Image (tube, rainbow, N blue to C red):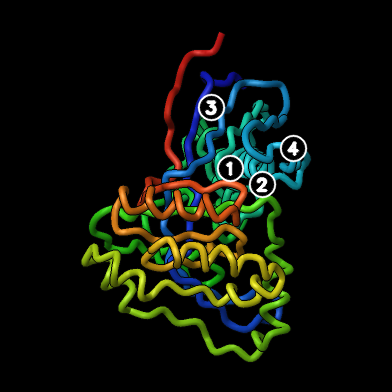
Amino acid sequence: MSTGPEVRVRAPGKINLALRVGPPDGDGYHPLATVFQAVSLHEDVIAAPALDLRLTVEGPDADRVPLDDSNLALRAARLLQERTGITAGAHLHIVKQVPVAGGMGGGSADAAAALLACDQLWGAGLDRTELVALARELGADVPFALTGLTAVGSGRGDVLTSAMVSGTYHWVLAVQDVGLSTPEVFAAFDDDGGRAAPAPHLDDALLAALRAGDPHEVARHLVNDLEGPALDLRPELRDVLAAADRAGALAAVLSGSGPTVAALAVDERHARSVAAVVREAEVARDVLVVSGPAPGARVLEHVSGG
């Protein structure tokens, strides 16, 4: 089968404005109630024609990204092949921005971008609904990386409902040298009483504040049930939260299973001020200013191959 031109797709990282976690079910999975927001820190996947499937990576922590079949982007491409019967290959090149194992869904963004890029490259012709169905098979955060913006996630986080949001939100991200294992954080949650946790439930006040476009009110309702267990595993993250507070952030919360801390600011100028103070505190490898909501996975360019 012939392949089309090279395709570049961009997919966003995410933060969890609220993450409520219930007790594990019989399969060991935790029901979630969460509010995702996609932010302007992204992953690019370039898909080029090739005889087989292969992967290369560049960007921060590229050496920590697996290049074998444990990589979600490769798994996404293989799943698309299996479901469509397509035998063409692809060279997938990932340009990273989202921290590895940072709780911001970088691997999920890679998978979402790879699905869309390979669908375009191979002319598979799947619509967004079909791509989202495949995304749900790859991981709980992958569907959101496809849809982006702001959404409520339920089930394992993969059942999405769009959230009405006014305005733009400005975030300061404190990125760490060493990631946190999501399974380890959930295990710590279970050991800390999570097995007896109530069913997860979102505070409607957060969604109302987002609709109103009020960052001060949004800040009052940022919450993450995994923050305590993550802080037990990495006590030094308390220094990051304290630095954000001293810097005048409206509020700060661990993103997902951590260790990235997201601090909410009033506007971009305030965010840059907060970032400067957090940077001076030397509690993070890098301090970034981003905004949200950002769009989901989308094709950036579609140029003829040589």
Looking at the image, which residue is at 42% across and 44% down? 40
- 165 shown above or below 69: below
Q: Earlier in the sequence, mark 3 or mark 1?
A: 1
**Residue 247 seen in the figure:** yes
Mark 4: amino acid? Asp
Neighbor class of circle 3 (other Cα within 10 Å; few <14, some 14-19, many 20+) is: many
Q: Earlier in the sequence, mark 2 or mark 1?
A: 2
Location of mark 3 (residue): 121
Which secondary structure lies at badge 2? helix
Horizontal placement of 99 versus 274: left or right? right
Name the disc covering residue 63, or none. Answer: 4
Mark 1: amino acid? Asp
Location of mark 2 (residue): 72
Q: Earlier in the sequence, mark 3 or mark 4?
A: 4
Mark 2: amino acid? Leu
Please name which of the two marks, 2 or 4, marks the residue nearer to the observer. 4
Looking at the image, which residue is at 63% across and 53% down? 176
Of the pair 296 and 41, the residue shown nearer to us = 41
Q: CA distance from mark 2 to mark 4?
A: 16 Å
Q: Position of residue 50 (x, y in %)?
A: 67, 21
Q: Earlier in the sequence, mark 2 or mark 4?
A: 4
Location of mark 1 (residue): 110
Q: CA distance from mark 1 to mark 4?
A: 15 Å
Q: Quadrant of the N terminus?
A: top right
Q: Dots 2 and 1: beta carbons under 8 Å?
A: yes
Q: Earlier in the sequence, mark 1 or mark 4?
A: 4
